[in-house]
Amino acid sequence: MPLLKIATLGEPVLRQRARELSKEELSSSSTQAFIDDLIATMHDADGAGLAAPQVMNPVRICAIEVRPNNPRYPYKPPIPLTVLVNPVLTPLSNETFANDEGCLSVIDLRGTVHRCVHIRVQAWDRHGVDVDFEAKGLAAGTFQHECDHLDGKVFVDRADPTTFTTWKNWERHHKAAFVARATALVQRFGG
Ligand code: ZN
């Protein structure tokens, strides 16, 4: 499985609305091979998720998986491998939480984004089967981040620019406070 090139900020593909797929297109061998490559690229880059526009393909597909002890996000509770096609997210709460986010398409930058704490996720899986589930806490933030990419949005659009930090300075100055917030969310919602 070839690894795909990850688009970085400034690539126009990151700023366009990705298009829906039909079931016929989803079931094609080329789309199925693309999904395999998307997952392999996410794993190789230690991402918590990767959306098709991030690998230069503007279609509404994203993959999400948080393995235990992900080196980029060791505080995130595990999320099993999930492929969403044509996803629709619906907020189930007005409450938000302050999520410190990074992105494989934004080199060496993190920032704080306020995300809905509880969402409903409706989509097809990679085989065109309906999925419908709820996500809470940090996992809800991960789904919102990835689905934003399908609408041409990047976390920097939603973050207060005064929270921007390099990864090194995040580790040095901001990690402890965020891990305390994250731990409280994990205790509240499980993981
Ligand atoms: Zn991203």
Image (spheres, rainbow, N blue to C red):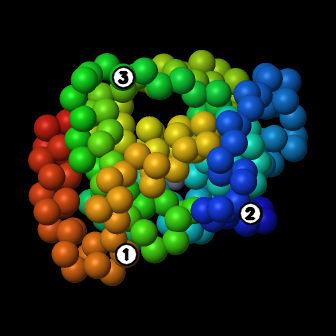
Do residues under tags 1 and 3 come within 8 Å of each other at their CB atoms?
A: no
| Residue under the image location 52 percent in, 71 percent down | 107
Quick check: is the Cβ at mark 1 less than 8 Å away from ligand 1? no
Q: Nearer the viewer, residue 184 or 98?
A: 98
Instruction: Please tell me whether residue 84 is drawn above or below residue 40 in the rendered image.
Output: above
| Residue under the image location 74 percent in, 43 percent down | 58
Instruction: Please tell me whether residue 11 is drawn above or below residue 81 in the rendered image.
Output: below
Q: Is residue 168 left or right of residue 142?
A: left
Q: Amino acid at mark 2?
A: Leu
Q: Nearer the viewer, residue 77 or 47?
A: 47
Q: Amino acid at mark 3?
A: Pro
> Mark 1 vs mark 3: which is more N-terminal?
3
Q: Amino acid at mark 1?
A: Thr
Q: Quadrant of the N terminus?
A: bottom right
The residue at which mark 2 appears reads as 4
Corner quadrant of residue 151? top right
Work out how far the residue at label 1 is from the one at label 3, CA to CA, in angstroms: 30 Å
> Mark 1 vs mark 2: which is more N-terminal?
2
Viewer can see residue 139: no
Work out how far the residue at label 1 is from the one at label 2, CA to CA, in angstroms: 25 Å
The residue at which mark 1 appears reads as 166
Viewer can see residue 74: yes
Which percent across, then down, holds residue 119? 36, 26
The residue mark sitting in front, 1 or 3, is 1
Q: Is residue 39 left or right of residue 1?
A: left
Work out how far the residue at label 3 is from the one at label 2, CA to CA, in angstroms: 32 Å
Judged from the image, the secondary structure of the residue bearing numbered disc 3 is strand
The residue at which mark 3 appears reads as 91
Q: Quadrant of the C terminus?
A: top left
